[in-house]
Image: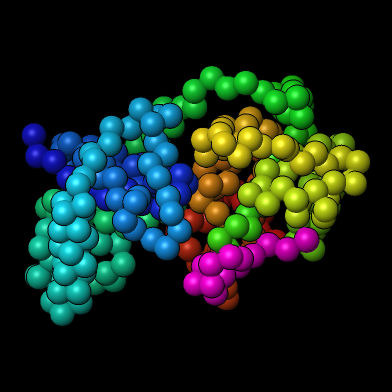
Amino acid sequence: MTSILFPVFGGLGNQMFQVAHGITLARHRGAQPLFADLTPVTGRVTRKWELDCFSVPRLSMGKMQAALLRVRISTGRHLQRLSPLLHLGVLDESVAHSRPDLGLTCSICSGYWQGERFFAAEANTVRKTFTFPEITIPPACFELDEAATSVAVHVRRGDYLSDPVAHALHYVCDTEWYCRAMDAMRARLPSPEFYIFSDDRAWASAAFGDTADVHVVESDPSASAWVDMALMSRCSHFIISNSSYSWWASYLGKTAESIIIAPRYWFQGVPTEELSVLCKDWILL
């Protein structure tokens, strides 16, 4: 059986998009997907492999192997911009005019692949792959499973504020946006209860801690990234930030009755509705 190498990098949400696309493309090709861990050497923010909770097999690479793979991807990307014929077997998402048949022949497939359309053909397989392990429910979240009006709220700040490059790229949802989103939920649901999950709990507590129907979840900072995602997915409705992390929490947790509110802008000045990350059932604010 032939194999396709899929570099994995970024945080948990992006890693899940890469694996979902990898599963789909490999099945379409009748090939074996190999997921290469490039988290230690890719990006400005330190990341790590987060997919052990889903038993996704990891292809560990030495520093030299990882460096050579990155050089091949970069060279293939630049050569394709000169001519689609000069691809070096690399399908790179960022190349706008790659060969149309490259997905059928590539040996390396690199990108973020954010959006359901990149794995729609294998959506059921992807959902089964991303089945969370059993989890202990913290006291603040005891009502999640029983409450038909529980709403997960994801407040993403972190590197969107601390990293100058990320801050220039990403739209940051502010207090006013979250207030409008919660008011929109209150207009649609009888007595909703909001559960805020955030990488900046102090900010979330200061902004919303005194609101009667809002609970700021006290996450364990030492816990793996999947834990809060699993808790969020147990809610009935979702207010997500412009983050692949809450994208997956809402995608894996939603039902036919779920209401999902998302930012109208995913990147600075870029409407969400123009991006592949958009889900057709979202309400954009």
Instruction: Name the residue located 15 percent from the left edge and 58 percent from the top edge.
Output: 68
Instruction: Name the residue located 58 percent from the left edge and 46 percent from the top edge.
Output: 246
Determine whether 37 is above or below 46 in the image: above
Residue 270 in view in this figure? no
Asked whether residue 78 is drawn in magenta, I would say: no
Q: What is the x, y in percent for residue 227?
A: 56, 33
Image mark count: 0
Residue 68 in view in this figure? yes
Q: Is residue 223 left or right of residue 106?
A: right
Does the magenta stretch mainly form a helix, a strand or a loop?
helix
Instruction: Name the residue located 20 percent from the left edge and 74 percent from the top edge.
Output: 78
Q: What is the x, y in percent for residue 101?
A: 16, 58
Asked whether residue 167 is drawn in magenta, I would say: yes
Q: Quadrant of residue 125?
A: top left
Q: What is the x, y in percent for residue 200?
A: 68, 52
Q: Is residue 259 left or right of residue 165?
A: right
Q: What is the x, y in percent for residue 115?
A: 44, 52
Foreground residue among 30 and 108: 108
Instruction: Name the residue located 27 percent from the left edge and 69 percent from the top edge.
Output: 95
Q: Which residues are the magenta region?
A: 161-175
